[in-house]
Image: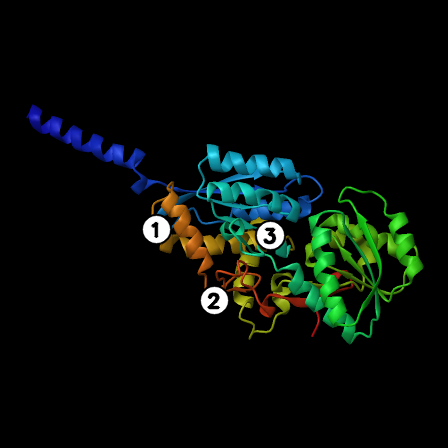
Amino acid sequence: MKRSIGKSLLQVATVAALLCSGSTWAQIKVGVVVSATGPAASLGIPEKNTFALMPREIGGKTVEYIVLDDASDTTTAVKDTRKLIYEDKVDIVIGSTITPNSLAMIDVAAESETPMISMAASSSIVEPVDARRRWVFKTPQNDGQMSAAITAHMADAGIKTVGFIGFSDAYGEGWFHEFSKFADIRKLRLVANERFARSDTSVTGQVLKIMAANPDAVLIAGSGTPAALPQKALKERGYKGKIYQTHGVANNDFLRVCGKDCEGTWLPAGPLLVADQLPETNMIKKSALRYKLAYEKAYGAGSISTFGGHAWDAGLLLAAAVPTALKKGQPGTKEFKQALRDALENTREMVGSQGIFNMSKTDHLGLDQRSRVMVQVVDGKWKMAR
């Protein structure tokens, strides 16, 4: 009898040891870096909110999301990434919200051979896919894709001259680089090139220079609520030309801060922004509405944001990649990280809230023209151009 009890206790202990320590039973750890405070908070908060809606089980494994706030600061983003990878031992990093922070995180991801999915827009985050960027993917549309849409719209509207004002960081520089290329192709002449910081409270000097050049249109290359500052200044000075913004302002917080000065603004955006207005034949509509319903059920009607959609799509990419990766390694191992990277790179026809992802060895975004629509602010609301 004693021998039977002892044998049973040994079996229980063995199973418990396997459950607690074996990689076979390890959970998937997802490290998240968002800009939930600071100048980019209007982008980062809906991203942070979205991770609360993510599945807690994928491929039969439990998933833990460790979310850190980089406060819109590059140094903090790097520190957070190192903590997640080297202390928390995450299998993948998702973040950050903005371009400068995402660019700063690349080296940490590459040196540790940890896959990373950025929620920021600039092409330079994933291009070219070199030894460092082979570990990095992203979900927002590239600035190049959106520049092509803006310049095409400008040309069709008969615009000949353009003034440019953008953030004095990698986001603004990336946009100027890409926009300049497409402007040249469309025979648009850039007559002003100005910069401002995300934390600035006045852009009077820059706006006066733009007004002096008298352009037919102005492109503001900013993101979140800080992008409203140049627009309000232009309107206050009586600018009558067309104003364009980037997809970095595609949320209701921007409309709230910009107010009546937003009226008539044009921008390219992901389909999620106008999901209700998409035709039934649009392949993305169902996926976009599924996320919109889930988010607004949790956070209230009208709370949806395209930036949260970038986080949601990162989660969809992860969910699609995990089952394949588990065939080659278990969470917590180098083999699993490598397999996750490979599975992400081989994503095919995955329908997200913002587009359809088809990645490859040379394309770690994988979105095409189906991922964008032209939108105008009409009566204080987003209206899709037909």
Label 3 SS? helix
| Badge 1 vs badge 3, beta-carbon distance below 8 Å | no
Of the two numbered discs 3 and 2 in the rendering, the one whose residue sits closer to the viewer: 3
- The residue under the point 62% across, 57% down is 123
Tell me the distance, in whole angstroms, between the alpha carbons under discs 3 and 2. 22 Å
Up the image or down, 297 lies above or below 31; here it is below
Identify the residue under disc 2. Answer: 349
Please, what is the three-letter code of the amino acid marked with disc 3?
Answer: Ile
Q: Residues within 10 Å of mark 2 (few under 14, many from 20)?
A: few
Q: Which amino acid lies under the numbered mark 2 shown in the image of this protein? A: Glu
Q: Cα distance, mark 1 to mark 3? A: 27 Å
Residue 296 visible? The answer is no
Is 2 left, or right, of 64 in this rendering? left
Amino acid type of the residue tagged 1 in the rendering: Leu
- Residue 273 image position (x, y, % from top left): 64, 61
Residue on which the image places disc 3: 125
- For residue 299, the mark is none
